[in-house]
Amino acid sequence: MAFTPHHVTETSPRGSSAEFDVERIRRDFPALAQKVHGKPLVYLDNAATSQKPQAVIEAEEHFYRRDCSNIHRGVHELSERATKSYEDARVKAQRFVNAPDSKEIIFVRGATEAINLVAGTFGRKYVQAGDEILITAMEHHSNIVPWQILCEEKGAKLRVAPINDRGELLLAEYEKLLGPKTRLAALVHVSNVLGTINPVREMVESAHRKGIPVLLDGAQAAPHLKVDVQDLDCEFYAFSGHKLYGPTGIGVLYGKAEVLDAMPPYQGGGDMISSVTFEKTIYNSLPYKFEAGTSNIAGGIGLGAAVDYLNGIGMESIAAYEDELLAYATEEISRIPGLRIIGTAEKKAGVISFVMEGIHPHDVGTILDQEGIAVRTGHHCAQPLMERFGIPATTRASLALYNTKREIDTLVMGIQKVKELLG
Ligand SMILES: *Cc1c(COP(=O)(O)O)cnc(C)c1O
């Protein structure tokens, strides 16, 4: 079953040359127009998940209302429509990260499953006792625990590249840790807690000089930056649909074809085989070899719509707008006495984590919620990183393309209120 989509239907709401009109963009997101506790919603929890534009909601709905059927095996009209939409979405994801071929785009549940897939296949095949996996001190649990499980099973060792107090990776230390026993470097592109944008292109280059393959965790990068996997030259790139204005339960693992081809399959089942007898099973070709069972078809189609939506605005415009918003928010928030921003790297994406003297982040979050402001508080799935900064938790405001300076002002007023009540 070699399905090659020829005509990818793209639905762009506006030309990419159009200037960035945030009020118009906000109208594309129905969830933003609501009140919470009687106040207009200020949604600043985008690093956990982002809101969805109408186009994404409609794409999923269209599938369920009209095209719902299983893909790849059907000869009937509905199945052909569903297969085409799903495979079109794969091509959209391919172009979104500039992958050379759509067979290098594996649909998974999200970044977590993408990383577990690599640990469970690449890791199972290539990692042995005494080998090492290198990560950084700013990884999400999703890029720590799968490697710990693998290391425990194989008797391998997890090594961690350290960071400085601003939350920047110590590159010289990282390079020293790339050794003859390193089988893979698994590195976060953008930190979900600190906002740090790592110099991943250089980091891939130094790993490659020593023949070490690299996986990049792009869960926080894909929604905010233009990602080009050919330019990065990484072996693997993982991201989630739901942080990219797409549905939950769908994500992408990009892998270089020759690397994926050499890997054993992930799960066994339907669609990942080309023939089965009780004696021997022949696996399907890429990408289907890694997609056992019925996929999240509606989710894939929704992700395709999210990519169209972003392309309609342009990732460069989005990054530029968010940079400006981050600069404004950083300036306004750091003016508040008794507040300390955690993560002050020179290169940052739209994440502001902070702690307040004598006030627990959980209380900050609860009071902000009463003001209609959604932020996240806690360890943000990065407990070792909290430990590195000697704090149990932070409050995190994370930005998306639909946030405004006015919302930042509301956040600042909310934080002032927290201080009045608890300071
Ligand atoms: C959210 C996140 C993940 C996990 O993504 P899921 O969508 O929960 O699978 C991994 N890494 C980073 C940096 C994240 O922010």
Image (cartoon, helix red, strand yellow):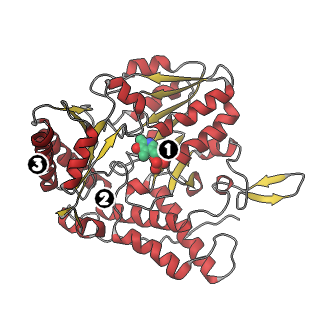
Residue 206 x, y percent position in the rendering = 46, 26
Q: Quadrant of ligand 1?
A: top left
**Which residue type carries mark 3?**
Met
Residue 14, picture quadrant: bottom left
Residue drawn at the location 40% of the way across and 63% of the way down:
306
Identify the residue shown where x is 60% and y is 20%: 181
Image quarter hosting the C terminus: top left
Q: Which of disc 3 and disc 2 is earlier in sequence?
A: 2
Locate residue 390, reporting x and y percent: 32, 23
Residue at which label 1 appears: 237
- Is 277 positioned to the left or the right of 172 in the image? right
Mark 2: amino acid: Gly
Question: Gap between marks 2 and 3, in whole Å?
Answer: 32 Å
Specify the amino acid type for callout 1: Tyr
Count neighbours of disc 1 (C-alpha within 10 A) and say few if under 14, some if 14 to 19, many if 20 or more. Answer: many
Q: Nearer the viewer, residue 287 or 79?
A: 79
List the residue tagged with mark 3. Answer: 413
Q: Is residue 218 visible?
A: no
User: Disc 3 versus disc 1: distance between alpha carbons?
Assistant: 39 Å
Mark nearest the camera among 2 and 3 is 3
